[in-house]
């Protein structure tokens, strides 16, 4: 049984705006699934449907074996949710928030106290536990939000853009925690607009654009689909030597058209071929000035599938506006 | 069944506690409940105390005794309004999403907020009774009246709170809820709260006589100034039930509309 399964999942808002348009997903138990897309692509709407906050207008979805529309209560008992921009009450203390969350999930009082203490320790907030959330930094808020999502030890954890706006150190701390949770057996459904985040964390990635799933697979498979790594290099004395250099490079892989005077060649074995190429050029009296091995990225995958770049790309209709209507 | 009810009651109590703490920690929510009605009570008592000499004015030991019920109802209406603003803020910052994503009945979120409003209503009634006694008011029917006034005020707070909660659910916007604040004054001044309806000019007098808020005010005032009247108290109870029923119906409709619109 899959942890998350959707079939032609769709959500249409008033005015005929179709934020999610027939998405099929299958996330295995114990997997970290990265749901990648620009602002307005339909990520948050999908998460809101999977977490029972929004009723689908088409298709169906099951989470932890329960239908989100027919048995939302059962779904809610099995999932943990950390939503975008950490919806925390700035007037509550960290401990109060966790205790409230525990009560909402029906934990007995004694267990609540112990669990909250353990969770605060786990996310490194013991010292700040009795401070109001309004005094927390962005990273601390995210960690508290994550802890709140874990009070009832959920089977499936939904993290909606958990590191948006965080500094690199806080971002890495969240990644570490997500990895640890996954190693303990929690299935993680993670939405993000950061390529690196999906690359670092996700076992598989789904790319959504315009409400449709445009690509799915492991980060490696997706990147391999759009091309091999290529080498970009320039020579110390390049003028008049381009054709000789290109002939040498052709022995190692498929030459690509030069761009702004930079020679390019697609190579199959990646960094292992850099040494032999430099040696071969030297033997012909050609000295390398600069050299860069360029790996395909998930952005390349996105460009390949949708014709637009992932980071910074957005549709005319902002999803947050649609949801707030 | 009993287990589920107990679990729901625990959730409502926890959400109510959180709402009370939120009110106490946010001065802009707390000030209208205590500061404004106390200031108005002090100003009116000091400035309009001779009103008791007007022909047709109820027989009262002093103007403060007459004004207490008005101050209590005014404060309770502000409590309902403040609770609704806090509820709308919760929706604006999507704190309610956290609650809706938990395995609880959606109605518990509203009931928790209303439980807090009812509790604050009881606290407010106690505060104004103590304040009144300190400054010379007297309670004609003694301790039973005090208990009755606290209970009626608490129920009235809950009833007013349902109207505010319905507006918050419908608008999803704290500014809109705040915008109804001046209406509270209109409703109060067109009632028995600060001046007897029989001494008002028409049509204000007619409106005040049939304003359900006048019934609530008189249900609190009579045991303070004159004595028990079954008719007055039954009218007060009916007004509270009517306002509450209307508010709950509006809340239910607003919840259904939110689900349909997906907010």
Image (tube, coloured by chain):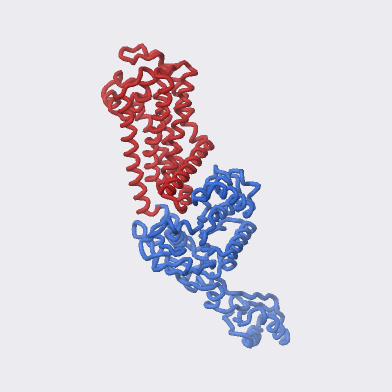
The quadrant holding residue A299 is bottom right
Of residues A90 and A208, the one nearer the viewer is A90
Pinpoint residue A70: horizontal percent, then vertical percent. Answer: 38, 60
Task: Using the image, determine if residue A169 lies above or below residue B232.
Answer: below
Query: What residue is rendered at 64% in x and 49% in y?
Result: A126
Is A7 placed left or right of B206 in the picture? right
Task: Using the image, determine if residue B194 lies above or below residue A76.
Answer: above
Of residues A4 and A297, the one nearer the viewer is A4
Pinpoint residue A293: horizontal percent, then vertical percent. Answer: 64, 75
Of residues B89 and B138, the one nearer the viewer is B138
| Chain whose colour in the figure is red | B
The quadrant holding residue B193 is top left
Of residues A175 and B217, the one nearer the viewer is B217
Is A299 placed left or right of B172 in the picture? right
Task: Using the image, determine if residue A239 lies above or below residue B33.
Answer: below
Pinpoint residue B61: horizontal percent, then vertical percent. Answer: 40, 13
| Chain whose colour in the figure is blue | A
Can residue A40 be seen here?
Answer: no
Pinpoint residue B236: horizontal percent, then vertical percent. Answer: 33, 28
Can residue B117 be seen here?
Answer: yes
Query: What residue is rendered at 57% in x and 68% in y?
Result: A199
């Amino acid at each position: 049984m899959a942890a998350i399964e959707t079939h032609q999942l769709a959500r249409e808002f008033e005015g005929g705006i179709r934020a999610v348009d027939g998405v099929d997903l299958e996330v295995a138990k114990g997997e970290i699934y990265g749901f990648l897309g620009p602002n307005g692509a339909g990520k948050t709407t999908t998460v809101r449907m999977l977490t029972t906050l929004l009723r689908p207008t088409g298709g169906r979805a099951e989470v932890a074996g329960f239908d989100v529309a027919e048995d939302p209560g059962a779904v809610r008992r099995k999932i943990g949710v950390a939503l975008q921009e950490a919806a925390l009450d700035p007037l509550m203390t960290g401990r109060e928030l966790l205790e409230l969350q525990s009560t909402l999930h029906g934990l007995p009082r004694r267990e609540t106290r112990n669990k909250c203490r353990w969770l605060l320790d786990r996310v490194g907030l013991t010292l700040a536990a009795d401070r109001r959330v309004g005094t927390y930094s962005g990273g601390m808020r995210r960690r508290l939000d994550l802890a709140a999502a874990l009070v009832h030890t959920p089977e499936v954890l939904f993290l909606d853009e958990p590191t948006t706006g965080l500094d690199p150190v806080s971002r890495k701390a969240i990644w570490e925690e997500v990895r640890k949770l996954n190693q303990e057996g929690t299935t993680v459904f993670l939405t993000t607009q950061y390529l690196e985040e999906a690359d670092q964390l996700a076992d598989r990635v789904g790319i959504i654009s315009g409400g449709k799933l445009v690509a799915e697979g492991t980060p490696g498979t997706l990147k391999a689909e759009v091309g091999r790594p290529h080498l970009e290099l320039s020579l110390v004395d390049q003028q008049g030597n381009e054709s000789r250099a290109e002939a040498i490079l052709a022995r190692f892989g498929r030459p690509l058209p030069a761009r702004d005077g930079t020679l390019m060649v697609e190579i199959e074995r990646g960094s292992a071929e850099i040494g032999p190429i430099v040696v071969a050029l030297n033997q012909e009296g050609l000295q390398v000035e600069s050299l860069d091995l360029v790996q395909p990225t998930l952005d390349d995958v996105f460009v390949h599938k949708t014709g637009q770049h992932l980071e910074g790309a957005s549709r005319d209709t902002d999803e947050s506006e649609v949801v707030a209507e | 069944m009993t287990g589920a009810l107990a679990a729901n009651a625990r959730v409502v109590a926890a959400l109510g506690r959180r709402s009370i703490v939120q009110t106490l920690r946010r001065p802009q929510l707390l000030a209208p409940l205590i500061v404004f009605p106390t200031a108005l009570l002090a100003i009116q008592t000091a400035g309009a105390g001779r009103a008791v000499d007007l022909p047709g004015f109820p027989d009262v030991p002093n103007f403060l005794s007459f004004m207490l019920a008005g101050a209590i109802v005014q404060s309770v209406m502000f409590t309902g309004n403040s609770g609704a603003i806090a509820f709308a803020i919760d929706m604006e910052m999507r704190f309610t999403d956290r609650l809706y994503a938990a395995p609880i009945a959606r109605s518990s979120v509203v009931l928790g907020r209303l439980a807090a409003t009812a509790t604050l209503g009881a606290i407010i009634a106690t505060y104004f009774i103590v304040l009144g006694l300190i400054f010379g008011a007297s309670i004609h029917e003694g301790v039973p009246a005090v208990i009755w006034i606290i209970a009626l005020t608490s129920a009235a707070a809950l009833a007013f709170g349902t109207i505010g909660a319905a507006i918050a659910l419908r608008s999803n916007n704290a500014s809109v809820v705040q915008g109804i604040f001046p209406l509270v004054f209109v409703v109060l001044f067109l009632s028995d709260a600060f001046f007897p309806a029989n001494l008002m000019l028409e049509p204000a007098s007619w409106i005040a006589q049939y304003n359900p808020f006048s019934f609530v005010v008189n249900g609190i005032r009579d045991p303070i100034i004159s004595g028990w009247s079954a008719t007055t108290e039954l009218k007060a109870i009916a007004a509270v039930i009517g306002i509450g029923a209307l508010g709950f119906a509006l809340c239910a409709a607003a919840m259904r509309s939110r689900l349909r619109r997906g907010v």
